[in-house]
Amino acid sequence: MPYLIIEHLEELRDWVLLEYRHASEWWGDKLIFTNVEEHERGELAKLGGVIPQSVTEFPFDRSKLIVLDPFAEEELKPEDIQEDTLIVVGGILGDIEFTGKTKKFITEKMEGVKARHIGSVQFSIDGSAIVAKLIAEGKRLEEIEYEEHPTIKLDEFSEITLHYAVPKLDGKLLLTPGLIDLQKRELGYTEVDDEISDEELIEFFEGKRDI
């Protein structure tokens, strides 16, 4: 089985950590985090290998690297992946639209690497890790189910719609474990005097603000 590298490019907030934990459940000891600051190493070492340097700086054999980049021309295929392949995912919280962050911060800095996409929809970090694992195990991209912008019920009266696609396996939505509880904590217990506006909610779901 190849390795998965997550190039850590976000502050290690609760949402990011949940996605990293889910990726670790799928990849186990084949998961490596790069570009990790000293104060974050202890937490991420519980989930996988940790390298302080960026993947763009570390002397990996770049012929063995595949960067998952939405702007790549070719899709990721099982035959692209060998036992010693290192698949690189950007540890980046997505926006509503693709913004080219992976290309800017990773692909363009690594001459000689292969770039591959995993479709026209946007996945979360852990969603991308899952899709990569399924392809590494022999599935083709068109065989992988997903639901785009799924609506998740928080309780009897409240629900959220995620701004990305979530992969499915045997019809089951592979949602990030703990995400619903996190949303309940962050959105369900505000004081009356501290109402959250619709605009603030939209920005929260787009990853542009904390609440």
Image (cartoon, rainbow, N blue to C red):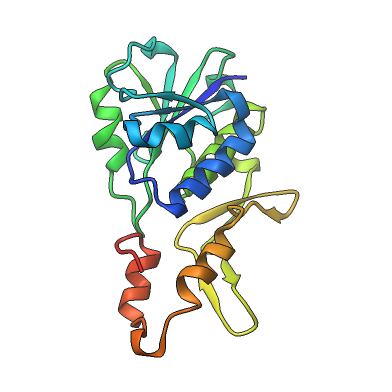
The quarter of the image holding the C terminus is: bottom left
Q: Is residue 28 above or below residue 129?
A: above
Number of dots carrying numbers: 0
Residue at 63% over, 44% down: 144
Residue 125 horizontal side relative to residue 58, left or right: right
Q: Quadrant of residue 91?
A: top left
Q: Position of residue 156 (x, y in %)?
A: 65, 83
Q: What percent of the width, then of the height, locates residue 25?
A: 63, 38
* Above/below status of 199 relative to 5: below
Rendered location of residue 192, percent (x, y) = 40, 90
Q: Nearer the viewer, residue 109 or 39?
A: 39
Question: Up-down: is 172 above or below 53?
Answer: below
In-front residue for pair 210/142: 210
Q: Is residue 24 visible?
A: yes
Q: Residue at x 41, y 85 (%)?
A: 191
Q: Seen from this angle, which residue lies furthest right?
A: 170
The quarter of the rendered structure image containing the N terminus is top right
| In the image, farthest residue toward the bottom | 192
The front one of 92 and 148 is 92
What residue appears at the point 60 percent right and 24 percent down from the top-left corner?
29
Could one spot residue 140 in this view of the protein? Answer: no
Query: Residue 105 appears at what percent x and percent y?
Result: 26, 34
Q: In the depicted view, which residue is nearer to us: 164 or 115?
A: 164
Q: Please give left or right for residue 104 compared with residue 59 in the image.
A: left
